[in-house]
Image (spheres, rainbow, N blue to C red):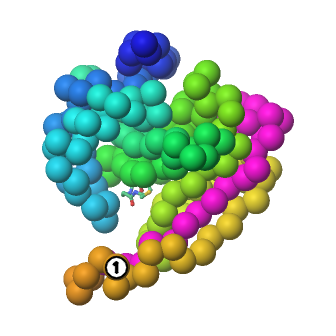
Amino acid sequence: MLTGNDFETKEAGRLSFRAPVANDGPAIHALVERNKPLDLNSRYCYIILCEHFSSTCVVVEEEGGLVGIVTAFIPPERQDTLFVWQVAVDTGMRGQGLAKRMLRHLLSRHNMKRIRYVEATVNPSNEASRSLFRSLAKDGKCDMSEELIFPAKMFGNGDHEQENLIRIGPIDSAGKTLIERNT
Ligand SMILES: CC(C)(COP(=O)(O)OP(=O)(O)OC[C@H]1O[C@@H](n2cnc3c(N)ncnc32)[C@H](O)[C@@H]1OP(=O)(O)O)[C@@H](O)C(=O)NCCC(=O)NCCS
């Protein structure tokens, strides 16, 4: 069985990247809560995600506190696809390439060898999120498509925007190498 330590990368400098453990659930919940406009899920949801999907998620620590997370999973029927669920970087750490480094860290794991597509859903107004995925596609020299997947009405009468599906790929082995090398 794989554990968080199997996916740990100590970076030179003050940041360390690793797979989460269940104990990280509450800190991930707090990070998502302070980094709008992400939807906040329950603590239980994040604990379970860390318990069962640790190998496809990453957390970044600075002096013992979490400053960035990517939660993701491989849909059971599509083993060549990494679905990125939530990405968050604390405000003070943004604009330094941290979100992309987390995606790169994930894609370089040995359990990602079969991944040829990266998917995520974004709100039309979230330019930071769209730019992140566009930048990843550019690094891997592959296509990125975007289309409506969940209309706003599915989220009730609140102010939730529609969700567009972003799909990057196919990422071939040369593209993967380019993504992993890019800094
Ligand atoms: C989206 C988010 C994770 C980006 O984190 P980040 O660490 O600042 O992103 P990076 O520095 O790795 O930037 C990656 C690319 O996106 C671009 N980008 C980042 N923020 C941007 C912004 N606000 N507007 C336009 N482009 C932006 C960067 O220029 C970079 O592109 P480049 O490689 O071509 O230069 C961060 O803004 C965040 O946590 N936002 C709140 C939560 C959220 O909306 N999450 C996304 C939902 S999936």
Using the rendered view, name the quadrant where residue 101 is placed: top right
Q: Nearer the viewer, residue 129 or 19?
A: 19
* Total number of numbered discs in the rendering: 1
Check the image and report above or below for 126 versus 2.
Answer: below
Using the rendered view, name the quadrant where residue 67 is placed: top left
Give the image location of residue 154, x and y in percent: 34, 79
Mark 1, residue position = 154
Quadrant into which the C terminus falls? top right
Q: Is residue 167 inside the magenta stretch?
A: yes
Check the image and report above or below for 133 versus 1.
Answer: below
Q: Is residue 46 left or right of residue 82?
A: left
Q: Secondary structure at mark 1?
A: helix
Magenta range is: 160-183
Quadrant into which the N terminus falls? top left
Give the image location of residue 37, x and y in percent: 31, 65
Give the image location of residue 77, x and y in percent: 57, 47
